[in-house]
Amino acid sequence: MSKPFIHESSYIDDDVIIGDDTKIWHFCHVQRGARIGSHCSLGQNVNIGNNVKVGNGVRIQNNVSVYEGVEIEDNVFCGPSCVFTNVTTPRSHFPAHGVYAKTVVKEGASLGANSTIVCGHDVGRSALIAAGAVVTHNVPDYALMAGVPARRIGWVCECGHRLDDTLQCSCGRRYHLVSEDVLVKE
C-alpha cells in the first residue's frame, strides 16, 4: 500500500483522514473532520464537506460536492457533476446551523452524471441512478431509477447490467422479488 496522492492545487483541512492509495486530483477541498477510505479517486474540483464519511473504493468524478450529512459507503460511483443536498428547505435568512438531513449512498451504488440526490433519502445497495435523474424518495437495493422525479424503471445486477424478467444476469448472479419494491440476491 502507498500513501495517498494529493495534487498540489488541492486543500486538505485539519483533522482529515485519507486512506492508502487514494488519489485526490486538481482543485479539490477536503474539509475538517472528513474521513476518506482507501483506494478512492476524487476527480477535479471535488469538495468533501465537514465530517463527511467516504468508504473504500469510491470514485467521485469531476465537479461533485459531497455536503455534510451525506455518507458514501464502499465502492460507490458518483458521476460527473452529480449533486447532493443537505437541507430540505434552505433559506439565506434562516441558516440550518449544522442541522442537516442525513443521506446514505449504500455499497456499490452508481449515480449518473448530473443526477441529484435530495437530502433525507437513501440510495440502496448496487442501485443505478440514471444521468439527470432527481431522487426524491428512498431507492431500493438494485433499483434502476430514471426521470424527474426519479422512478424505478427496472432492476440491475451488482455488476451493473440491467436484469430482464428472469432476474438472472448474464454474469451468473440470480435475484428474486420479495415484494414489488424488494429484490434480493440468491
Image (tube, rainbow, N blue to C red):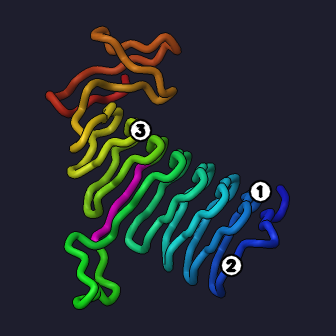
Q: Amino acid at mark 1?
A: Asp
Circle 3 residues within 10 Å: few <14, some 14–19, many ≥20: some
Q: Is residue 104 magenta?
A: yes
Residue beneath the point at 33% across and 12% down: 164
Q: Secondary structure at mark 3?
A: loop
Q: Is residue 157 above or below residue 120?
A: above
Image quarter (top left, top right, bottom left or bottom right) of the C terminus:
top left
Q: Are the residues tagged 1 and 2 within 8 Å (C-beta)? A: no
Q: Earlier in the sequence, mark 1 or mark 2?
A: 2
Q: Is residue 76 visible?
A: no
Q: Which residue position is annotated with label 2?
A: 12
Is 29 placed left or right of 181 in the picture? right
The residue at the far left in this view is 180
2 vs 3, front mark: 3
Q: Which residues are magenta?
A: 101-106
Q: Earlier in the sequence, mark 3 or mark 1?
A: 1
Image quarter (top left, top right, bottom left or bottom right) of the N terminus:
bottom right
Q: Secondary structure at mark 1?
A: loop
Q: Is residue 64 above or below residue 137?
A: below
Q: Is residue 60 magenta?
A: no
Is 116 placed left or right of 121 in the picture? right
Q: Is residue 18 above or below residue 174?
A: below
Give the alpha-carbon distance from disc 1 to disc 2, as whole Å.
Answer: 16 Å
Residue 105: % across, % down: 40, 53
Residue beneath the point at 51% across and 26% down: 159
Q: Which residue position is annotated with label 1?
A: 21
